[in-house]
Structures are given as structure tokens and as C-alpha cells.
Image (tube, rainbow, N blue to C red):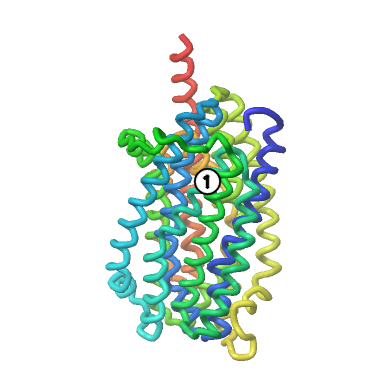
Amino acid sequence: MTKGSPLRLLLSFSIPLFIGNLFQQLYSMVDTIVVGRFVGVEALAAVGSTSGFSFMVVGFAQGLTAGFSVIVSQRFGAKDHSMMRKAYAMSIITSALVSVIIALLFSCLSLPLLRLIDTPENIIGMANSYILIIYIGIGTAIYYNLFSSILRAVGDGRSPVYFLLIASALNIVLDLFFVIVVPLGCAGVAIATILAQGISAIISFIYIKKKFPIFHFTKEDWKLDIPLCLRLLKIGIPGAVQFSVCAIGVIIVQAAINGFGSDTVAAYSVGGKIENFITQFFPAVGMAISTFAGQNLGAGNLERVRKGFRTSVIIMICGAVIGLFVAIVIADPFSYVFMDKETTSPVIISQAVEYVHTIAWFFIPLGLIFIFRTGCQGLGSGAIPMISSIAELIMRTIAAFTLPMAFGYKGICFASPVAWCGAGFVLPFCYLFLMKKLVARQAKAQK
């Protein structure tokens, strides 16, 4: 990442990540498709009603481990392999502690949280059985994301894609097994997801050990380094919390949707799955610029960091235009993948399509969020991602409590775009401020 064309490097890094993200979406999409087609619309609504809480813990894992990999990326760029290995070892230890805390805390809170957002009584039992298993198995998600982030930190964006291909295929087989052969319903698809993620994590760890000699640990690497663990948490927790803060906004919107009944919950769930599938290019570009920025910061080349950000914005805008076109074309036919056309109410399909068509016009501010939030994290800033997440939460909360009252379901559809605009247009200015500080720090160090 420190040499060569930024456009070529960012694209070659983003495209495998994009493909990997699409397959990662298959975890939740297959869950929804299987329960929607083989259990029923209520089961689909149950799984969908937990999306905010699932995003809270899984997003926390993604943000945390992406932050952990920042030091690895920077030390790799600086060719400091000893500190790089130490940071990797401490990331593994810290991830274990975080996994236990999250599993214990959220397992106790799963049912009270579902009641807090007025989950419809006809689906709350199924919803709780699904999300409780996701919470208990959160360690598999944390470690899979950690090992994938480590690979990306050293410039390997392809290998995680291959591991996801295997895990996605396993997830499909296990979903069908635990729903049709062993009829466990919503609990079955949750078990399948945890098992598939666990296998991905194990394969990733073994691959890193065999493929990269620079990650061969010594006894000294495993010696507990509390200051380094705290430094990892200092970078990782703001990124993790910003995902969780965003999830709180999603949960608030979910509470508003729950008041419309389980059919609308199902429609919104389907629309959200389609949205996530279409928009996976944006986090891929975000991860690419994070790695690019981290390595070039470690190499002391701030001008190259600027070129990387400018290039990533151009890539993102092109992706947003393509995403808009895809959303308009596939929203209706794709909705029927999740539900039986003959037995599903047309209202559910029309509401799902309405949501996708509405949010698609706001993909550019969403793309800005991923580029500048994740990119600034790659530059070592935890504050900027946090500020943008809080702005997004405030805007989403205001929208969720006001727009549905005035515009009904249409107001729900605009809640996310309002939040994206609130956060997306602030972040570029935060990035410019951060770069100014980094330039001043570099100039001072050179004197």
C-alpha cells in the first residue's frame, strides 16, 4: 500500500473485500430466507426484529477488531515486525475477555431489551431464541473479524473471501438441516450462523500461522502487556462503540416499526436485507482506505494518504450511482426470494420495495460515512468515528420519533437517509482537521 497507483491498489483491495462482504451478508440473508420460506412470515419478522440488537454486538466486534488491526497495519508499514506480533497476540487475549463480557451481559438482557422496544407478542419468543444464541456465540464473530482484519492489515484482502465462501456454503447447509431435518426454527438458523462463523475463525487463524512467518509467535509475544492492551482498546473501543451507537439508532427505528405490526416488521426486515446486500461496496472501500491510510501513516507519507482519500471518494461516488440503479431494478423481484409469492400479502412486498427505492437515493452520504469514519480510524483517531456516530444517532432518533407521526411508513423509510446526511457531510471536515494535526505533528518531529 506504500507504493504504486492508489486507484489500482484501492480497487484491487476493495473488490475482494466487496465479494467477501456479499458472502458475509449471506449469513443473515440465508437465515431470513430459510425461516421466511420454511417456517413462515412471523418467523421472518422475528429474526428481522432482532436486527438492531444483532448489529449492536456484531458491529461492536467489527469495530473493535478493525481498531485492533490499526497498530498491526502501522507497524507493518514501518517494518516493525516484533511490535506487530506483540499487538496481534495481545489482540487475541483482549478479544477473549471482551467475548466473555458481551456474552454474559447481553444473554441476561436479551428478553428485557426485546420487550423494551415493544416487540409484538406473536413473535417475541422466536426473536428471543434467535438473538440469545447469537449473543452466547459472539466470540466466533469477534475472532473471525479479528483474523480477517489482521490479514487485511498486511495487505491480504483475498484470503478472507475464500474462507467466507466455505463458511457461507456451510451456513446454508446447516440452516436447512436445523430448520427442516431438525426443526428448531429461529433457534436453528442462529446455531447454524455461529457454527459457520466459528469454522471461518479457525481456518483464518491456521492460515495466518502457516502463510505469514512474520506472525510466528515467540513466548515473549504472549507475555501480558497491559499498556499495549489498553492502547488496543483505546483505538478499538471508539470504533466498536460507534457501531453500537449506530445500532441504538436502528433499534429506535425498530421500536417505531414494531408499532405497525408484524407484517410491516417483516417488510422492513426484507428491505433492510436488500439494502445491506447492495451497499456492501461502501464498507469494502472504507476498509481499503483504512489499511492504505494506516500503512502510509506508518511510512510517514501523508501526501500519499491524501491521494488515497481523494481516490476513494471518486470510487465511492461511482459505486453509489451503480447501487442506485441496481436497487431500483432488483427491489421487487428480490423481495420474493425471502417469501412465497403465492401466500405473502402484497402489502408486505410493496412496503419492502418502497423502503429500498427511498434509501437508494442517499447512497453518497452513506458512502462518505464509511470512507471518512473508517479511514480516520486507520489514521489512529477514535474521536472522529465516535462524533459521527453520535450525530447519526441523534438524527436517526429525531427522525424515528417525528417522521412516522406525520408520514406513516414513508417516514420510517426516511429515518436512515436523514441519519446518513447528518453524519456523512460532517466527516470530511473532521478528516481535514485531523490531517492538519498530523502534518503539524510530522513537521515538529522533523525539526
Q: Nearer the viewer, residue 360 or 273?
A: 273
Q: Is residue 405 visible?
A: no
Vertical side of 140 occupied by 48: above or below: below
Q: Position of residue 384 (x, y in %)?
A: 42, 40
Q: Residue at x 29, y 62 (%)?
A: 104
Vertical side of 336 occupied by 286: above or below: above
Q: Residue at x 48, y 15 (%)?
A: 443
| Residue tagged 1 | 149
Q: Is residue 10 visible?
A: yes
Q: Position of residue 411 (x, y in %)?
A: 47, 68
Q: Position of residue 12 (x, y in %)?
A: 69, 43
Residue extending furthest toward the bottom: 343
Residue 270 in which image quadrant:
bottom right
Q: Is residue 23 left or right of residue 436?
A: right
Question: Local crowd at mark 1 within 10 Å, few (<14), some, or many (≥20)?
Answer: many
Q: Residue at x 50, y 26 (%)?
A: 80
Q: Is residue 228 left or right of residue 22?
A: left
Q: Residue at x 36, y 42 (%)?
A: 233
Residue 162 in which image quadrant:
bottom right
The local secondary structure at tag 1 comes to helix
Q: Position of residue 407 (x, y in %)?
A: 46, 71
